[in-house]
Image (tube, grey):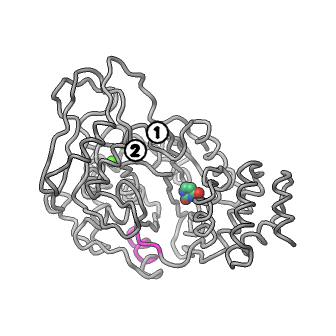
């Protein structure tokens, strides 16, 4: 087999076989196929796309390029959730204990990552004592005992994806649906998921800018799941404004606790109930989303979800007393209000810009080695559709530096107050 022939085949839109795709991924991972040939292949894929069979074969070839986490010693169907990335997305912190409280095992590996705020691990790290480095056996033991564990990534998962993503990044081939879909799905499958729930974000703050693109990506991933025997469900949700009110690590932990108490922001609560219900359906615990949402509501109202959150924090070495006293998590030195310059209806809170306003305070990292300041961030006091008066506080900036000029100017750029607004739904589509 010669790579040049396979590039030409892709260029001519002829379906590649499983063996051919394995040859490409194995060769590229091992350094036998050079970057320039792989780049040409990616560009051909960018223009001609892939069939469902090809994307599924590509996904499994990437899974096999590295270690695969074996979770078979955990009883039950292990469901993982993936979000394509939002601003202030606190859903994992809420869903993990909420779904576990229903008896479904949540065995999650999470990362730090780059972005407006830290990854789930960074958020949890703002809790005193919380540990996330566990051996594979300890991880399994934690899930079997508590139904939930969130640990840092171990092992060499999907090296093909890491190498491929780096190449796509510098060759303008990131935005290809089959390449994105296989990248995301391969990581979830390698991490041991039996079933997968996807939250595909669409909007100004998201990777997918249009509903059509988001639907295409979600449907492609759901079909990969079907083809490779991992039940996969997806939600397409709005990321025109940040989800919930808090953007920042400690601030989001506090928001997660409020939501688990049934006192969270409406949009965050709604999305968590829907994603959680999909996780319960994917694990075969319930047969309908309605039944799933009812069960989750019960766990919130009875206090079982919050109790599970505390149990999970304690099991991983943390001190869960902050659940009843959030001041134990510490707070930023300054709380600076961001006020409305005119009266009207809040018509725009550009998620990306709000995220950047939090990031420049130290809530997230631009570079891999940047340090995160857990206490800083932004808490919105108004959301799109709210009526506001000139001088009303729209958000509070939590900073350890008195000078927040950079953050303030990004907030200025993020907000729009108009005379009217067209309200967009939080959930655009549900794909099963
Ligand atoms: N996120 C991923 O994990 N992979 C992609 O290719 C794009 C976004
Ligand atoms: Ca949030």
Q: 301 left or right of 397?
A: right
- In this figure, which residue is indicated by the disc labeled 1? 204
- Where is the N terminus found, in terms of image quarters? bottom right
Say what secondary structure mark 2 lies in: helix
In the figure, 80 relative to 261: above or below?
Answer: below
Q: Residues within 10 Å of mark 1 (few under 14, many from 20)?
A: some
Identify the mark at residue 91; answer none if there is no mark.
Answer: none
Task: Choose between 94 and 123: the one closer to the eye.
Answer: 123
Say what secondary structure mark 1 lies in: loop
Residue at (76%, 52%) from the top-left corner?
50
Q: Residues within 10 Å of mark 2 (few under 14, many from 20)?
A: many
> Could you say where residue 150 lies in the image, as x and y percent from the top left?
40, 68
Residue bounds of the magenta highlight: 140-153
Name the N-terminal-most of marks 2 and 1. Answer: 1
> Could you say where residue 371 lies in the image, as x and y percent from the top left?
30, 67
- In this figure, which residue is indicated by the disc labeled 2? 352
Is residue 53 in sight in this rendering? Answer: yes
Q: Tell me if label 2 and label 1 are in contact, CB under 8 Å.
A: yes
Q: Is residue 152 magenta?
A: yes
Q: Is mark 2 within 8 Å of ligand 2?
A: no
Q: 360 left or right of 292?
A: left
Is residue 184 in sight in this rendering? Answer: no
Q: 186 left or right of 393?
A: right
């Amino acid at each position: 087999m010669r790579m040049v022939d396979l590039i030409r085949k892709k260029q001519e839109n002829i379906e590649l076989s499983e063996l051919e795709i394995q040859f490409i991924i194995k060769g590229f991972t091992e350094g036998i196929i050079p970057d320039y040939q792989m780049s040409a292949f990616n560009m051909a894929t960018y223009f001609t796309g892939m069939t469902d069979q090809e994307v599924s074969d590509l996904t499994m070839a990437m899974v096999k390029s590295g270690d695969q986490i074996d979770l078979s010693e955990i009883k039950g169907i292990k469901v993982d959730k993936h979000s394509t990335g939002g601003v202030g997305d606190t859903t994992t912190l809420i869903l993990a204990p909420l779904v576990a409280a229903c008896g479904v095992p949540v065995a999650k590996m999470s990362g730090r990552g780059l972005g407006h705020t830290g990854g789930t691990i960074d958020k949890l790290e703002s809790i005193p004592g919380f540990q996330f480095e566990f051996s594979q056996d300890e991880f399994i033991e934690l899930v079997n005992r508590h139904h939930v564990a969130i640990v840092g990534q171990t092992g060499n998962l999907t090296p093909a994806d890491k190498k491929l993503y780096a190449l796509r990044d510098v060759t303008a081939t990131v935005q290809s649906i089959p390449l994105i879909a296989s990248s995301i799905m391969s990581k979830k499958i390698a991490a041991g998921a039996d079933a997968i729930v996807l939250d595909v974000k669409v909007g100004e703050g998201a990777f997918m800018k249009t509903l059509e693109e988001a639907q295409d990506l979600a449907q492609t991933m759901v079909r990969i799941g079907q083809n490779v025997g991992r039940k996969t469900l997806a939600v397409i949700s709005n990321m025109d404004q940040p989800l919930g009110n808090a953007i920042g690590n400690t601030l989001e932990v506090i928001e997660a606790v409020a939501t688990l108490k049934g006192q969270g922001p409406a949009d965050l609560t709604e999305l968590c109930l829907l994603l959680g219900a999909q996780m319960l359906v994917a694990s075969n615990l319930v047969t309908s989303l309605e039944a799933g949402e009812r069960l989750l509501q019960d766990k919130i109202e009875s206090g079982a979800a919050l109790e599970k959150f505390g149990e999970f924090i304690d099991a991983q070495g943390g001190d869960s007393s902050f659940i009843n006293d959030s001041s134990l998590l510490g707070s930023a030195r300054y709380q600076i209000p961001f006020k409305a310059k005119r009266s009207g209806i809040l018509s725009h809170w550009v998620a990306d810009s709000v995220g950047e306003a939090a990031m420049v305070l130290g809530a997230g990292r631009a570079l891999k080695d940047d340090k995160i300041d857990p206490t800083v961030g932004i808490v919105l006091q108004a959301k799109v559709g709210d009526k506001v008066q000139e001088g009303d506080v729209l958000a509070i900036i939590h900073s350890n530096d008195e000078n927040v000029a950079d953050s303030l100017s990004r907030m200025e750029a993020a907000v729009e107050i108009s005379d009217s607004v067209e309200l967009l739904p939080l959930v655009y589509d549900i794909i099963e």
